[in-house]
Image (spheres, rainbow, N blue to C red):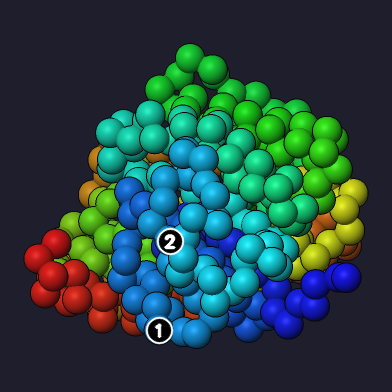
Amino acid sequence: MATIIEKKNILVTGGAGFIGSHLCEELLREGRVICVDTFITSQEANIDHLLKHPDFEFIRHDITQPIDLDAFPELARFQVKVQGVQEIYHLACPTSAKKFEQYRMQTLYANSVGTRHAMDLAVRHKAKFLLASSCVVYGNRPDDAHLLKEEEIGSSDTLSPRACYDEGKRWAEAICATYAQQYGIEAKIARIFRTYGPRMALYDGQLIPDFITNALEGKPLEVYGDETFKSSLVYVADVVDALIKLMQAPKDIGPVNIGSDVDVKIFDVAKQILQMTGTAASIEFKPPLLFLTQLGLPDLTKAKERLGWVPLTTLENGLKETISYTMANRHILSFRGF
């Protein structure tokens, strides 16, 4: 007799992170959410408002270790032993800009062993799977600055200090594709480009939140690079919308770019934040950080045609939301002694 599913169970690894917490929040509209995280570079504050939700459960677990959902009695109310899990979003991976070198091994394991364990869980529960990959799989920004299509093979330096992340994401995609081919799992790959918005870690070299925080505190805004440093910037709510659409897309869709195809100078973004915050802080240029490099721009044709998705939030509106959040959150962080 088939199990009657009232609400689907959805598991999100890295669910307390920047993008993950927004994804958990949105997924509660359509199911019960199991958030798995270890707070290596994420924050409990990101999910505080979800902890009392009847359809939300947090599990503190390192995905680089095997996971057996039956071992968590708190999931009994979700009937996991009977119903299982219907969808798995795998976002777990350290993403600290300033602490990147400190967490290289955790990054390596999250992209490799962590992806394997998440896929093992998908096989066990016959769940649909989505891997949060990255635009770093394409390698450095191309000299001619052409828009990057999903068909491009890309390249990365396997011996570089960044290899644990860049090559790690390529390896995670290989694991995802191989499991799908071998076990018939419905697996999707999202290649996410540089994202910003509320809940990004403060004081971590993550460009936008640090610009805002420094502007509000009257400190110099630090651009890691020079005036030519460019990037695309996509707002987190648009990314979440794309991830959910991709999970529901046809099985054979292949990797999909998720980001903005508009190039902006980071120096100009810093100036815009100074104007929006009404402060007179200066802008200084610092040596580039290992985790912050100039990346290419996405070709969004597939996302538009196959998902019906385009990023809708303008940079101005996204910055307004992020400034409002940062103004409130920096006081909370200060109160907690961070």
For the point 28% across and 51% down, the residue is 204
- Look at the picture and state if 101 lies above or below 216: above
For the point 49% across and 55% down, the residue is 71
For the point 86% across and 43% down, the residue is 184
Amino acid type of the residue that numbered disc 1 sits on in the rendered structure: Lys
The quadrant the C terminus occupies is bottom left
- Which SS class for mark 1? loop
Q: Quadrant of residue 238?
A: bottom right
Which one is in front, 308 or 315? 308
For the point 24% across and 67% down, the residue is 213
Query: Is 125 displayed left or right of 81 in the figure?
Result: right
For label 2, the crowd category at 10 Å Cα-Cα, with few meaning under 14, some 14 to 19 and many 20 or more, is some
Tally of numbered discs: 2
For label 1, the crowd category at 10 Å Cα-Cα, with few meaning under 14, some 14 to 19 and many 20 or more, is few
Query: Is 246 displayed left or right of 269 in the figure?
Result: right
Q: Percent x, y for residue 117?
A: 58, 40
The quadrant the N terminus occupies is bottom right
Q: Percent x, y for residue 98?
A: 28, 42
